[in-house]
Amino acid sequence: MTSTRITVKGERPYEVVVGTGVLAELPGLLGDGVGTVAVVHPAGLPEIARPVCGALSTAGHTVVPLPVPDGERAKSVDVAAELWSAFGRHGITRTDAVVGVGGGATTDLAGFVAATWLRGVKVVQMPTTLLGMVDAAVGGKTGINTPEGKNLVGSFHPPAGVLCDLATLVSVPREDYVAGLAEIIKGGFIADPEILLLVEDDPEGARTPEGRHTRELIERKVQVKADVVGADLRESGVREILNYGHTLAHAIERVEDYRMRHGEAVSIGMVYAAELSRLAGHAPAGLVERTRSILASVGLPTAYRSEVWSQLRDHMRVDKKNRGARQRFVILDEVAEVTRLEDPSEELLEAAFREIAR
Ligand SMILES: NC(=O)c1ccc[n+]([C@@H]2O[C@H](COP(=O)([O-])OP(=O)(O)OC[C@H]3O[C@@H](n4cnc5c(N)ncnc54)[C@H](O)[C@@H]3O)[C@@H](O)[C@H]2O)c1
Ligand SMILES: O=C(O)C(=O)C[C@@H](O)[C@H](O)[C@H](O)COP(=O)(O)O
Ligand SMILES: [Zn+2]
């Protein structure tokens, strides 16, 4: 099947290329005039980085492979500092580039060091997980965690291109693959109802790279993200809708010390946001039911430990959507009808949590 190209508009438009066996597209996405390429990849996945380094070498680039810790452990200031040192040692200049190869954690880190080195060098993202392809690697939000919370340090730094080679998905562990479905389903609730219908039509298939609707699901979610970030890169308005479910999700990840997958936390966070939407008088009960049932149908969690509410509440206070002491939530009136809940009462926030607590 041929590759699909989805354009992300904005100051510097770029393409997200989706297809199988599309590595040959990498030099084209990097563009002319690039010398050395630093390839940031998880240390545990050399087999994924090797062909990328080979393709870059063949295209005439000097290649610097830079292995980083696996998954979320890569998103720390210590790892970022190690990469800055490596960039210095290898003499990375503004005519050089970074390629991030791996899951969303790796592309978040690679994007962040590219954004900050010399105040910004070119980055091409090569996501190798479902979540990376449909969300993390698209849109230019880069970042690392601090002890105080998730993604608290970062920058908006759009990539020069995103290459999604669907062949890489076959080795992704099933739990990590399914976690990516949470962000696809999020795209259905905030913008594209067809996504929900496709998952509901074949939930078992949605759990695998070989599913009947897999490619359409990926392309539809990339399109949702491209439309939103093309209109509002810096999250001054509409981009906030991509944060649906994330206020509680990030607090859960912090409480779990990042041992729960991001997509799993987003799944629970979406049920919470749906309950909040209902209890605030916005969404009908049917929307909450549909949220629970579609997430459960693909094997995602929909409830969370009841005893940690006060810890979660503390972490929710550092959410980026807050304005001073005013907490703000992305909620729904209906599928694809997104609004905001400003400064909800403590009682309302806790009542919604009781609905998802186990
Ligand atoms: N920047 C954004 O807009 C944005 C959007 C959504 C999520 N995120 C971030 O993305 C991260 C989650 O991404 P994720 O779900 O990809 O998790 P991840 O990066 O931790 O990857 C999950 C696991 O899969 C492994 N892996 C990656 N590719 C593989 C492959 N092809 N075969 C086998 N194993 C492979 C990884 O090494 C890791 O162990 C979180 O840090 C989240 O905050 C960022
Ligand atoms: O791209 C965005 O904007 C998003 O909010 C997408 C989210 O899925 C993603 O997890 C993002 O990293 C969260 O951003 P944050 O600013 O809340 O840290
Ligand atoms: Zn997310």
Image: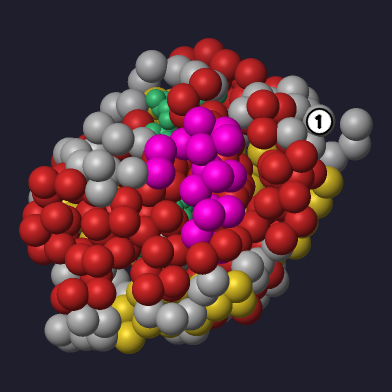
Residue at image x 9%, y 58%?
310
Q: Which residue is mark 1?
A: 212
Q: Is residue 18 left or right of residue 283?
A: right
Check the picture and name the quadrant holding the C terminus. Answer: top left
Q: Position of residue 125 (x, y in %)?
A: 56, 44
Snapshot quadrant of residue 278: bottom left
Q: Quadrant of residue 119?
A: bottom left
Q: Is residue 37 above or below residue 171?
A: below
Dot 1: within a 10 Å radius of its alpha carbon, few (fewer than 14), some, or many (20 or more) residues? Answer: some
Measured as percent of width and height from the top left, residue 30 is found at 65, 47
Counting from the top left corner in percent of width and height, residue 256 is at 19, 39
Classify 335 as above or below 198: below
Q: Which residues are magenta?
A: 287-302
Residue nearest the observer in this picture, 107 or 339: 339
Q: How many marks?
A: 1
Q: Overall secondary structure of the magenta stretch?
A: helix
Q: Residue at x 14, y 55 (%)?
A: 309
Q: In the rendered structure, does residue 290 fall within the stretch colored magenta?
A: yes
